[in-house]
Image: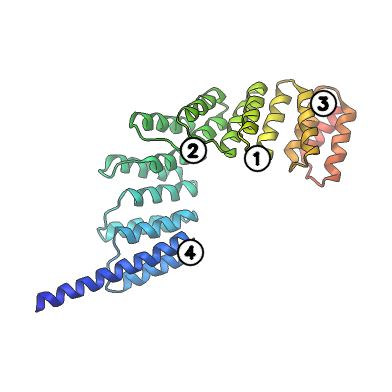
Amino acid sequence: RSVAAKHSSYMKVESTTITCNAVASTCEKSGAWEKTLQLMGVMVQSSMKPDTISFTTAVSSCEKVGEWREALHLTRAMSRRSVQMDMLSFNAVISAYEKGSEWVKALQLFGMMAQSKVGLDTVSFSAAISACEKGGKWKDALQLVSLMKRSRIESNSVTFSAAISACEKCGWWEKALQLHSEMACSKVELDVITFSALISACEKRGEWEKAFWLLSVMVQAKLQLDVIALNAVGSACEKGGKWEMAFQLFDAMVRTKANLNTVTFNTAISACGKSCEWKRALHIFRVMVRSKVERSTVTFNAAIGDR
């Protein structure tokens, strides 16, 4: 009878833990991270024993809103309670670090994960590569891409986008285009953010032909052209000495009522300066004033230089 009573008590606690995990999961999916932590507190203070699922759900809830410090606190609590971390737990914490721009901590945890028996998956690599990209560690990002290939782990749009963005920040446009080709071969769908990073990588080197080609691919894919991509193409034309093309692109953006910003106008005015089109520069400056777009030092320097 005593054994039966203990078994009944165990089943009750287990059942309650499962119920709390289910509620916590609902909170996590709805973005209510504070409610998730409150529920964890209730579980800890009661006779219930939070398990791997409990902690993983709480960590994931914090990760989604960038609360990496809370995620770290939960990870330490897991260790104190001898609750084993699984792949989902590791991934959630790495992602939390990545969103908090704590790329060093993200890579350290990624290394621990690689040395453990948990293993690595697409999410692990994507978060680590994204952390490298945010930390300006583009070489580390590309090394992780190579390791991912050797490990035969499938890449996704997040992985490629982060790696391409890392290339864009260091102006390595050839490698960025190589990754673009690999995406196409892997049949990974490209989004606006990826294209914008590719075009920006070409822009930094004045590769206007490649930038225009990528813009045409975006149009063919029926992706919405954002101001970042359009500005990058215009800047590539300006840097490549294709001023008339930069003007045409600017005029098209005005006609289509695109969301013009300071960079858009600065690029057009700078192109005017290089082509000695001072009257056009003043016209663009007036349009900028009428549009109530913020002027910068670059704007005034370019406009004055055109005179």
**Mark 1 and mark 4: Cα distance apart in space:** 32 Å
- Where's residue 197, x and y in %? 58, 34
Reading the chain from its start, which is encountered first: label 3 or label 2? 2
User: In the picture shown, does residue 252 fall above or below 13?
Assistant: above
157 left or right of 18? right
Splitting the image into 4 quarters, where does residue 209 fall? Answer: top right
- As drawn, the label of residue 166 is none
Splitting the image into 4 quarters, where does residue 77 fall? Answer: bottom left
Reading the chain from its start, which is encountered first: label 3 or label 4? 4
Q: Is residue 109 visible?
A: yes
Residue type, numbered disc 3: Gly
**Mark 4 and mark 2: Cα distance apart in space:** 27 Å
- Where's residue 200, x and y in %? 62, 31
How crowded pointer 2 is (Cα within 10 Å; few <14, some 14-19, many 20+) is rated as some
User: In the picture shown, does residue 305 fall above or below 122?
Assistant: above
Residue type, numbered disc 4: Ala
Q: Circle 2 sits on which residue?
A: 157
Q: Circle 3 sits on which residue?
A: 273
**Mark 2 and mark 1: Cα distance apart in space:** 17 Å
Considering the image in quadrants, where does the C terminus appear? top right
Reading the chain from its start, which is encountered first: label 1 or label 3? 1
Q: Circle 1 sits on which residue?
A: 224
148 left or right of 5? right
For image coordinates 63% across by 36% down, the residue present is: 222
- Where's residue 299, x and y in %? 79, 36
